[in-house]
Amino acid sequence: MRRVRRLCGGLLRRAARIVDRLVPGAVATVASVLGDVADRSSPRGRFWLQYAGTRFQLDLVEGRPFWHQTFSRWAVGSEVYELTMIECLTRLVLRTEAPRFIDIGAFMGHYACYVAALTGDHSEVYAVEGNPRYCVAIERSVRLNGFSQLKVYNVVLSDREEVAGIDECEVRFNASGKHSARTTTLDELCRQETIRPVIAKIDVHGTEGKVLMGMQQLMQDSLDFVLLELHSEDWLHRYSGGMSRADVVGIFERAGFHLFYVAGHRSSGSPERQQTMNADALTYRRVTSQSSDLLLFDRPEDVLLLGSKVADVEPLLRPRRD
């Protein structure tokens, strides 16, 4: 019976991918209908997501069709968004004794909610997001899932206190936007809230240089691992005060972190790719100030870096089948 269910599930996922290619948006519509059937009270844009047996609900903001379709594909099992990131995060969380997790640039909260569900709501999770609209969505998801250990902070991070303009996912310092806020540093936020995260995920669309410079004490103190989405030289130059990727590598080295490039960040999150990843160790290479240009020069798009205070990350990144 299990074999039949797996076969039927695989056929349905393949059919969903074919339909999605032939009729863009069709999978999103199907997922929305399925959600309504499962829960008549669910508003449009609320999905049950699961990865490696961990399930949670995610409530999306309205008016973001691309993200509605992205999470729809995840909901019906045709593709997990940022598969390499979530698998790397899963292995770190499961192999860390006290995996207090902070999601910097939390967006709509899918990573924060996933880790809260993965740890059974027994470990502290912090979601830091500058856009108040997205923070409202994360708070809705927290209530939907009944999480008690997930705290949401509507804060814009930088390396100093300054004015920031916010438009959707873009933050511009000393400029205006749809929303505006005064920034703070992560060190100051952690001091005020008395929190000591151990694992961090950072995706801040080019402002990572400024965010990292504002968390130097945290990197010296409690933080052991950083999963960083490193953006292009152009984005860094524009949003991090002229910094380069080499400058970001230098920040990690000065803080005593070993840095690794993790391959496959933008690979498909299809079921076939998930099976391969579950069976194999993650592919990674050491990055240093001397090797960063050679390793990253032909990767103009965003890449995934792992910063670790542990030099040997093989035991952490090995397959989870054990």
Image (cartoon, rainbow, N blue to C red):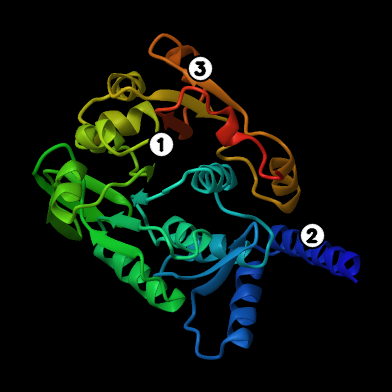
Q: Position of residue 206 (x, y in %)?
A: 32, 37
Secondary structure at numbered mark 3: helix
Residue displayed at 62% across by 81% down? 33
* Above or below, 255 relative to 89: above
Q: Residues within 10 Å of mark 1 (few under 14, many from 20)?
A: many
Q: Position of residue 140 (x, y in %)?
A: 37, 75
Q: Residue furthest bottom?
A: 40
Q: Amino acid at mark 3?
A: Leu
Residue displayed at 69% across by 64% down? 23
Secondary structure at numbered mark 1: strand
Residue nearer the viewer, 167 or 77: 77
Q: Is residue 44 visible?
A: yes
Q: Position of residue 203 (x, y in %)?
A: 38, 44
Q: Position of residue 80 (x, y in %)?
A: 61, 54
**Image position of 72 (left or right of 102):** right
Question: Where on the picture, by quarter, is residue 6?
Answer: bottom right
Q: Residue furthest front?
A: 97
Secondary structure at numbered mark 2: helix
